[in-house]
Image (cartoon, rainbow, N blue to C red):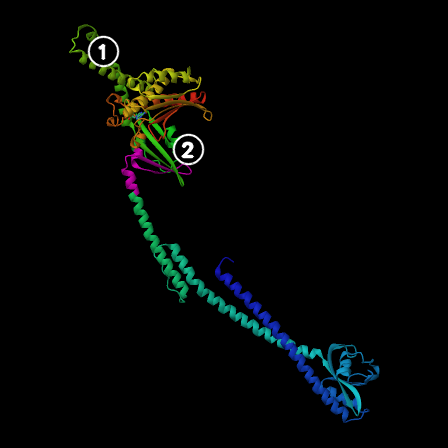
């Protein structure tokens, strides 16, 4: 019963059946009651006629008179004495009849003057309807009773019921027929609409034999409007899609979209050029992409972990930066060609290393020559110039040293590979502090030193010393730069144990000129220098912006990091050095990255 028409028809049939059955039941009950009343009234009338006959005849004629009257009136007439003895009966011999005093109609007639009853008569062997009255006949109180067989009533009742049932059935059939017709008219336009919607295209009601109802016409109109709106939306979506595809095609990066099942859903043309492969739409990316890093990155993104990785295509000599993010229904990877930047970086590193090496010899010769001239053959006028030459040579040598160290850190050369030298970080900090305190600008500065007795660590002592020295030198320079020879300049060197990581934390803080907000995010980048005008003391001029880059690289080499803390005044840096063995593995990773 899936169809509306069947359901409605069934509902109609059930309700009609129920209505008609109840109507029939009710009507037949009414008919039965009315017939009963009518029969009782009829018997009353016959009883009256019997009384007249009894009054007009004497008791010896009663038997004959009542017998004939009973036949004529088609009823049984009985005369009963108050003690229950049957005096006369129109259909039976009174002498053979038992005492009738216990009969309900007789009892009622004796008590109330009238009574009636329906029951099976043992005397005439039929179901009978009795009406009895207590009346005086020839001055004697007698009970006169009339009765006729119920079968007569039943026949009338059955005939009535039959004709009523037939009429109701006819009405039900007619109603069902009309209902089915109506349902057909209701459903036919809906079916026609469904057909039109399924067919696609413009929605309209085809010409139908019957005019559809107003509701169906409204439905057709609503569907038509909806279809038009959908058409517009689809068109807009199509335009958006083309627009997006054009944008994606004109991007200088490759875009790859995969679905949850790992199949390539979209790839923009630059991707094919980057990966040197034809369109692989619909294929699983694992079988198509040659770079295991890229495959892993996409697999991670499909598991909900976004990430970035470098992709090296050795055969094509290409270096790509890939970024993958998980999206609803899959993942998107964006690939950027870093080849040029990579090669540039490589040649920059090579240049720095080569230039550093090449410049070392001339710088040493300049220094030796200037020193020789200072010691031996210079006049008083020449001395300041020679001292300037030495000073500048020192600056250039320091810069070269920093550049070479950074380039060695980057390439991993000239750095102890195992980093397992035993270092007492506390002692190392004390040495660095003492050296910094000898700085000409440190004369008026106050020191706060809080170091543990000892802080055992495994690493590269020279590199670590360089880290702390760089931070302390900066603290001296930029605190003296604020206070000059005035009191108030303070530097604190603290070392704390972080049991959570576990790691050592070396904190260098000062109340110097501080670091402007705009610089904070780039402070550890190479050649990043602050505004020299912020330093009041001319002597406190900075270096070339490599000191903090070295600190960062060195901390990373040891599996740690350097942080610029938030501080109300001055600057505060923390070097975090995690303990081996976790540190060792991180260092290996750091060394690999380098
Ligand atoms: P530089 O050799 O120029 O000091 P660094 O890499 O050590 O190079 O520092 C980069 C810049 O960071 C500096 O030019 C300076 O502006 C800022 N800086 C570093 N340390 C401090 C500090 N303790 N207080 C204020 N500014 C600092």
Q: In the picture shown, does residue 415 fall above or below 310?
A: above
Q: Position of residue 274 (x, y in %)?
A: 30, 31
Pointer 2 residue: 300
- Which circle, 2 or 1, is nearer the viewer? 1
Is residue 132 visible in the rendered image? The answer is no
Q: Which numbered circle lies on residue 542? A: none
Q: Is residue 287 magenta?
A: no
**Residue 375 horizontal side relative to residue 593, left or right:** left
Q: Quadrant of residue 542?
A: top left
Query: Circle 2 — which element?
Result: helix
Pointer 1 residue: 367
Q: Which residues are magenta?
A: 244-272
Image quarter where the C terminus lies is top left
**Residue 336 horizontal side relative to residue 4, left or right:** left
Q: Quadrant of residue 363?
A: top left
Q: Is residue 256 magenta?
A: yes
The residue at the point 19 percent across, 12 percent down is: 386
**Residue 592 horizontal side relative to residue 26, left or right:** left
Query: Circle 1 — which element?
Result: helix
Q: Position of residue 70 (x, y in %)?
A: 74, 86
Distance Cα–Cα, label 2 vs label 1: 57 Å
User: Which mark sits nearer the N-terminus, 2 or 1?
Assistant: 2
The residue at the point 57 percent across, 73 percent down is: 168
Q: In the picture shown, does residue 13 fall above or below 228?
A: below
Q: Position of residue 272 (x, y in %)?
A: 31, 33
Circle 2: is it few (<14), some (14-19), or many (20+) Cα within 10 Å? some
Q: Position of residue 437 (x, y in %)?
A: 33, 17
**Residue 505 horizontal side relative to residue 382, left or right:** right
């Amino acid at each position: 019963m899936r169809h509306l028409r069947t359901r409605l028809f069934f509902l109609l049939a059930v309700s009609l059946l129920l209505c008609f059955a109840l109507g029939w039941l009710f009507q037949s009950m009414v008919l039965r009651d009315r017939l009963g009343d009518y029969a009782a009234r009829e018997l009353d009338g016959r009883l009256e006629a019997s009384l007249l006959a009894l009054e007009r005849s004497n008791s010896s004629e009663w038997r004959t008179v009542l017998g004939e009257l009973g036949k004529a009136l088609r009823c049984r007439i009985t005369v009963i004495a108050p003690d229950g003895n049957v005096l006369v009966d129109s259909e039976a011999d009174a002498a053979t009849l038992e005492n009738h005093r216990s009969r309900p109609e007789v009892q009622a007639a004796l008590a109330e003057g009238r009574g009636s009853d329906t029951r099976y008569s043992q005397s005439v062997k039929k179901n009978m309807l009795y009406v009895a009255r207590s009346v005086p006949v020839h001055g004697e109180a007698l009970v006169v009773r009339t009765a006729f067989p119920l079968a007569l009533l039943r026949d009338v009742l059955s005939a009535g019921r039959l004709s009523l049932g037939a009429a109701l059935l006819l009405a039900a059939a007619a109603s069902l027929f009309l209902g089915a017709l109506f349902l057909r008219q209701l459903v036919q336009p809906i079916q026609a609409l469904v057909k039109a919607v399924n067919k696609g295209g413009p929605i309209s009601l085809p010409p139908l034999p019957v005019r559809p109802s107003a509701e169906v016409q409204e439905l057709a109109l609503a569907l038509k409007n909806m279809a038009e709106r959908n058409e517009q939306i689809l068109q807009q979506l199509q335009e958006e899609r083309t627009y997006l595809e054009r944008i994606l095609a004109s991007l200088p990066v490759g875009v790859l979209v995969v679905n949850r099942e790992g199949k390539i859903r979209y790839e923009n043309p630059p991707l094919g050029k980057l990966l040197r492969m034809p369109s692989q739409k619909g294929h699983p990316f694992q079988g198509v992409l040659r770079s295991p890093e890229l495959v892993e990155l996409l697999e991670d993104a499909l598991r909900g972990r976004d990430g970035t990785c470098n992709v090296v295509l050795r055969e094509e000599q290409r270096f790509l930066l890939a970024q993958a993010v998980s999206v609803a229904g899959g993942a998107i990877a964006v690939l950027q060609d870093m080849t040029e930047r990579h090669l540039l970086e490589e040649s920059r590193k090579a240049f720095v290393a080569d230039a550093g090496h090449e410049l070392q010899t001339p710088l040493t010769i300049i220094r030796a020559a200037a020193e020789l001239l200072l010691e031996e053959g210079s006049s008083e006028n020449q001395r300041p110039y020679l001292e300037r030459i030495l000073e500048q040579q020192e600056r250039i040598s320091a810069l070269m040293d920093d550049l070479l160290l950074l380039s060695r850190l980057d390439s991993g050369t000239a750095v102890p590979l195992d980093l397992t030298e035993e270092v007492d970080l506390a002692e190392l900090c004390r040495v660095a502090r003492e050296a910094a305190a000898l700085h000409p600008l440190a004369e008026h500065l106050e020191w706060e030193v809080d170091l543990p007795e000892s802080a055992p660590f495994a690493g590269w002592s020279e590199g670590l010393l360089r880290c702390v020295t760089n931070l302390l030198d900066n603290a001296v320079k930029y605190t003296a730069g604020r206070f000059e020879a005035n009191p108030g300049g303070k530097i604190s060197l603290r070392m704390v144990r972080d049991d959570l990581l576990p790691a050592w934390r070396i904190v260098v803080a000062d109340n110097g000129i501080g670091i402007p907000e705009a610089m904070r995010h780039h402070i550890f980048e190479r050649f990043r220098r602050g505004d020299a005008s912020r330093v009041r003391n001319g002597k406190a001029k900075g270096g070339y912006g490599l000191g903090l880059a070295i600190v960062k690289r060195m901390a990373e080499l040891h599996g740690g990091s350097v942080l610029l803390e938030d501080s109300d005044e001055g600057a505060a840096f923390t070097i975090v050095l995690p303990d081996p063995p976790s540190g060792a593995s991180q260092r290996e990773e750091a060394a690999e990255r380098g």
